[in-house]
Image: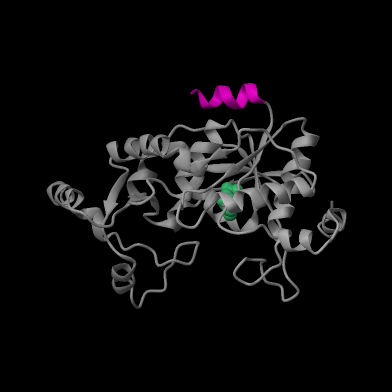
């Protein structure tokens, strides 16, 4: 597939990409409605993609509810809907390409080992996880082979230093303000992620790898998602550059907060769209509350 061709011929293409590991809340509804509105304004496509690589936590029961919620909001999307769980072979090819160029390496550390190795340091990645100290980066080839041949957990990590060396120009991206439409360039700072996990044993990919591969493969020209994912875009730009994938335009939108000013989340008990729907609340009321 020629990624650039997909972008050029497909026209403006937007996507809403929930993880079907729970029910949608108002924050997700805002994201979906904004994607849909921008796609319509641009005369473009609106895709739905299920980011279900965590097969233990994701399920088709959630997918059906998400589709019912989105239909209730009046949204329509192209079919068939993409499921990332069907695409592990493609992510594997991308991972192999990074490993083959010594830009990624296997890591055998458990969470506990990393916690132990980073005890006393406060440096975290943008997600708040301890920055990986690089323990497995320096394993010999023979040791790697030996450990890969034995059963047990392994992740694949990007070798950040090697990756940054492999991209010659400074990285940035086009960020468009979703409200004003103003465009600016933001400099990517992927080093803050350290040797990020790009694939896990049980799932031969991670969010960061899958999202850039699928956005390119689906010809996505415009990524519209919550502001909490802004730091991840630095890492995504790096992966796009390493894998020779085109960069979409990005719009990171405001988050919908609860009365206490917290980001809505399933774990904090934010009401789901399904609950609102079942309580007889009108979709128009929800949309008005969100500014649509
Ligand atoms: N699957 C991600 C989520 O549910 C969204 C990813 C994205 O829009 O890039 O938070």
Examine the image and state in which quarter residue 76 appears.
top right
Tell me the magenta residue range: 1-10
Instruction: Give the camera-side residue of 98 and 80.
Output: 80
- Is residue 59 rendered magenta in the image? no
**Where is residue 145 drawn, in percent x and y?**
16, 47
Question: Height in image: 176 above or below 152?
Answer: above
Q: Main secondary structure of the magenta part?
A: helix
> Can residue 177 be spotted in the picture?
no
- Tell me what residue is drawn at x 45 percent, y 37 percent: 87
Examine the image and state in which quarter residue 124 appears.
bottom left
- Tell me what residue is drawn at x 39 percent, y 57 percent: 194
Examine the image and state in which quarter residue 221 appears.
top right
142 relative position to 255: left or right: left
- Tell me what residue is drawn at x 59 percent, y 30 percent: 219
70 relative position to 164: left or right: right
Question: Height in image: 108 above or below 212?
Answer: below
User: In this figure, what is the number of numbered marks?
Assistant: 0
> Can residue 233 be spotted in the picture?
yes
**Where is residue 257 drawn, in percent x and y?**
72, 67
**Where is residue 132 drawn, in percent x and y?**
35, 62
- Is residue 7 rendered magenta in the image? yes
- Tell me what residue is drawn at x 50 percent, y 23 percent: 2
Instruction: Give the camera-side residue of 122 and 81.
Output: 81
């Amino acid at each position: 597939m020629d990624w650039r061709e997909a972008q050029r011929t497909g026209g403006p293409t937007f996507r809403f990409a929930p993880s079907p590991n729970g029910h949608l809340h108002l924050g997700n509804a805002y994201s979906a409605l904004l994607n849909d509105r921008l796609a319509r304004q641009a005369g473009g496509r609106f895709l739905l993609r299920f980011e279900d690589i965590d097969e233990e936590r994701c399920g088709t029961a959630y997918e059906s509810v998400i589709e019912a919620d989105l239909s209730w909001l009046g949204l329509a999307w192209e079919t068939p809907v993409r499921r990332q769980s069907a695409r592990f072979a493609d992510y594997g090819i991308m991972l192999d390409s990074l490993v083959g160029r010594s830009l990624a390496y296997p890591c055998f550390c458990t969470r506990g080992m990393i916690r132990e190795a980073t005890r006393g340091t406060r440096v975290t990645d943008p997600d708040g996880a301890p920055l990986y100290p690089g323990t497995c980066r320096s394993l010999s080839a023979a040791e790697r082979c030996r450990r890969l041949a034995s059963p047990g957990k392994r992740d694949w990590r990007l070798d950040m230093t090697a990756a940054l060396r492999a991209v010659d120009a400074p990285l940035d991206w086009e960020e468009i303000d979703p409200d004003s439409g103003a465009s600016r360039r933001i400099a990517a700072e992927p080093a803050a992620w350290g040797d990020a996990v790009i694939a896990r044993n049980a799932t031969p990919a991670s969010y960061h790898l899958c999202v850039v591969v699928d956005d390119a493969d689906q010809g996505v020209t415009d990524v519209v998602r919550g502001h909490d994912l802004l730091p991840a875009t630095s890492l995504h730009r790096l992966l796009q550059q390493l894998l020779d994938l085109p960069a979409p335009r990005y719009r990171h939108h405001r988050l919908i907060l609860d009365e206490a000013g917290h980001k809505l989340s399933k774990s904090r008990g934010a009401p789901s769209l399904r609950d609102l729907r079942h309580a007889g609340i009108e979709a128009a009321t929800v949309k008005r509350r969100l500014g649509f």
